[in-house]
Image: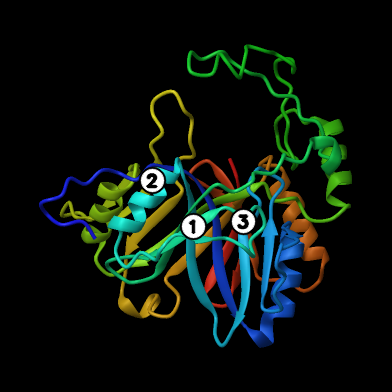
Amino acid sequence: MVTAEQDIRKIQLKRISHVYYTHAASSIAKQKEFLADFGLFECTSPSPSADKTYYRGFGIDPWVYCLSSGEENKFGGAGFVVESLDDLEYAAKTLPDATPIYDLKDAPGGGKGLTFKDPVDGFPMHLVWGQEERTPDSDEKLSFPKIDFNFVSLSILESCCPRVKTRPANKFQRFEKSKAIIDLDLTRRLTNFCSKGPAPVYKLGHYGMVVTDFAKTYEFYQSRFNLIASDLLHTPTGHNVTAFNRIDRGSDTLVDHHTSSSSKGPLATYTTLPSKHTTLTLKYSAMTGCAIKAMRYAGVWEDISWGVKSSTTGLTRRNSSWSTMLMAT
């Protein structure tokens, strides 16, 4: 831990990468079935274990979800990729109850990591560096339907998103029927895609926590990492009680609106399971409909819901005391 006399610099995070969950041994088989229907891909571990299974999306992260067998359901924390080995070494020296740096021998992609404890509520958190990134699966490999986007040239996007108009005016692309003009061809292509199975997950989106002392939690993560609040919610008296935090990678780098959220809540809601939800990202918002169809057609997942929140389409499947969500921006 750093002392008051030492200068504290922020540990530079690059992106959120993965989460750990433990399930009671009696429910492992059902959870594996759920994750497959949810659109995750089981991946091979370099050191296979009977009580641990890794799952990936189709993006660059070698894995996004670690499923472990245990005595009870438990959230094992989220993992973030740091910018450099120096950041990892600094974290090992200065974060509360940080472990020595260890090799991720049994995890796909390898690399090095450490675990530290949240100083307020004590749940584990993880930092990694040096993982071997995947080459993202192509649209052709995943049989994604082609969607025609129109791009506008903003100064921050000029290098990657030139001004390209591929769809004529007044032609909308919708998964569901609406009063607007419907792209019937797109609807047909998405329907055909849905019939093939779950909508593939791209990456981990964010996780949400309920914490006992919001002010202390907020101050810790804002001061020790390059995290800033995209949104803060407060009471009528002006006390902040919820934060949606994004990774600050400078004005030239686009990032997700948030990779974590924290909300003040009563102790009883998270003493055994701090995480309230975890989200997984899809390629297109229209594919949320595919995910719903796939899970309902499976005949075993009835407790699912979907809606539009904060301009984001989400699918939620509640599992034990938490919910797992698919999000597509």
Number of residues whose C-alpha sits closer than 10 Å to that of mark 1, classed few (under 14), some (14–19) or many (20 or more): many
- Tell me if residue 241 can be seen: no
Q: Is residue 233 above or below residue 257?
A: below
Counting residues from the start of the chain, the first of labels 2 and 1 encountered is 2
Structural distance between the alpha carbons of marks 2 and 1: 11 Å
Q: Are marks 3 and 1 in contact (CB under 8 Å)?
A: no
Q: Are marks 3 and 2 in contact (CB under 8 Å)?
A: no
Three-letter code for the amino acid on which mark 2 is drawn = Asp
> Which image quarter: residue 237?
bottom left
Q: Is residue 212 above or below residue 191?
A: below
- 242 or 82, which is in the foreground? 82
What residue sits right under mark 1 in the picture? 113
Left or right of 150 on screen, residue 267 = left
Three-letter code for the amino acid on which mark 1 is drawn = Gly
Number of residues whose C-alpha sits closer than 10 Å to that of mark 2, classed few (under 14), some (14–19) or many (20 or more): some
Q: Position of residue 236 (x, y in %)?
A: 20, 54
Q: Position of residue 68 (x, y in %)?
A: 62, 75
What residue sits right under mark 3 in the picture? 64
Counting residues from the start of the chain, the first of labels 3 and 2 encountered is 3
Q: Secondary structure at mark 3?
A: loop
Q: Residue at x 67, y 78 (%)?
A: 51
Structural distance between the alpha carbons of marks 3 and 1: 15 Å
Q: Secondary structure at mark 1?
A: strand
Q: Residue at x 77, y 74 (%)?
A: 300
Q: Residue at x 57, y 15 (%)?
A: 159
- 137 or 95, which is in the foreground? 95
Q: Is residue 159 above or below residue 33?
A: above
What residue sits right under mark 2 in the picture? 87
Structural distance between the alpha carbons of marks 3 and 2: 21 Å
- Tell me if residue 304 can be seen: yes
Number of marks in picture = 3
In the picture, the quarter occupied by the N terminus is bottom left
